[in-house]
């Protein structure tokens, strides 16, 4: 009898806790949307996914298209 009551309490408590976690998550998403954090995060993810072009790499290294591998390796 006591085991059954304890099991019911655990199940009910788990349900209440799960609902509270979901509600807190929804509120956190709403707060992020209001403050602009969500948009900033999406922009940062998009920026991080960009690949450097050959032209950008050449500009950073200070070499031209006609540079040989040996010249490029000397710069590095």
Image (cartoon, rainbow, N blue to C red):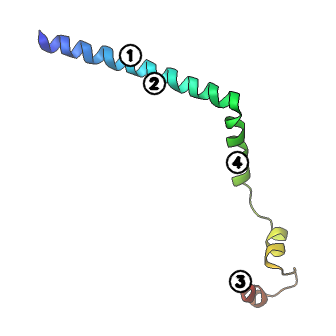
Q: Residue furthest left?
A: 1
Left of 64 or right of it: where is 29?
Answer: left
- In the picture of the structure, the residue carrying the numbered disc 3 is 76
Query: Which of the image's four quarters has the C terminus?
Result: bottom right
Neighbourhood count class around disc 2 (C-alpha, 10 Å): few under 14, some 14–19, many 20 upward: few
Whole-number angstrom distance, CA of label 2 to CA of label 4: 27 Å
Dot placed on the residue nearer the N-terminal end, 2 or 1 = 1
- In the picture of the structure, the residue carrying the numbered disc 2 is 21
Q: Is residue 48 above or below residue 59?
A: above
Mark 4 lies on a secondary structure that is helix
Which percent across, then down, holds residue 48?
A: 69, 54
Dot placed on the residue nearer the N-terminal end, 1 or 4 = 1
Whole-number angstrom distance, CA of label 3 to CA of label 2: 51 Å
- In the picture of the structure, the residue carrying the numbered disc 4 is 44
Dot placed on the residue nearer the N-terminal end, 3 or 1 = 1
Whole-number angstrom distance, CA of label 4 to CA of label 3: 28 Å
Residue drawn at 67 percent across, 42 percent down? 41
- In the picture of the structure, the residue carrying the numbered disc 1 is 16
Which percent across, then down, holds residue 26?
A: 56, 23
Dot placed on the residue nearer the N-terminal end, 3 or 2 = 2
Mark 1 lies on a secondary structure that is helix
Q: Are marks 2 and 4 in contact (CB under 8 Å)?
A: no
Neighbourhood count class around disc 3 (C-alpha, 10 Å): few under 14, some 14–19, many 20 upward: few
């Amino acid at each position: 009898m006591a085991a059954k009551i304890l099991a019911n309490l655990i199940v009910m408590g788990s349900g209440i806790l799960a609902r509270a976690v979901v509600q807190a998550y929804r509120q956190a998403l709403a707060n992020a949307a209001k403050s602009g954090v969500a948009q900033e995060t999406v922009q940062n993810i998009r920026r991080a996914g960009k690949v450097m072009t050959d032209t950008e790499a050449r500009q950073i290294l200070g070499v031209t298209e006609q540079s040989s591998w040996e010249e490029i390796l000397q710069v590095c």
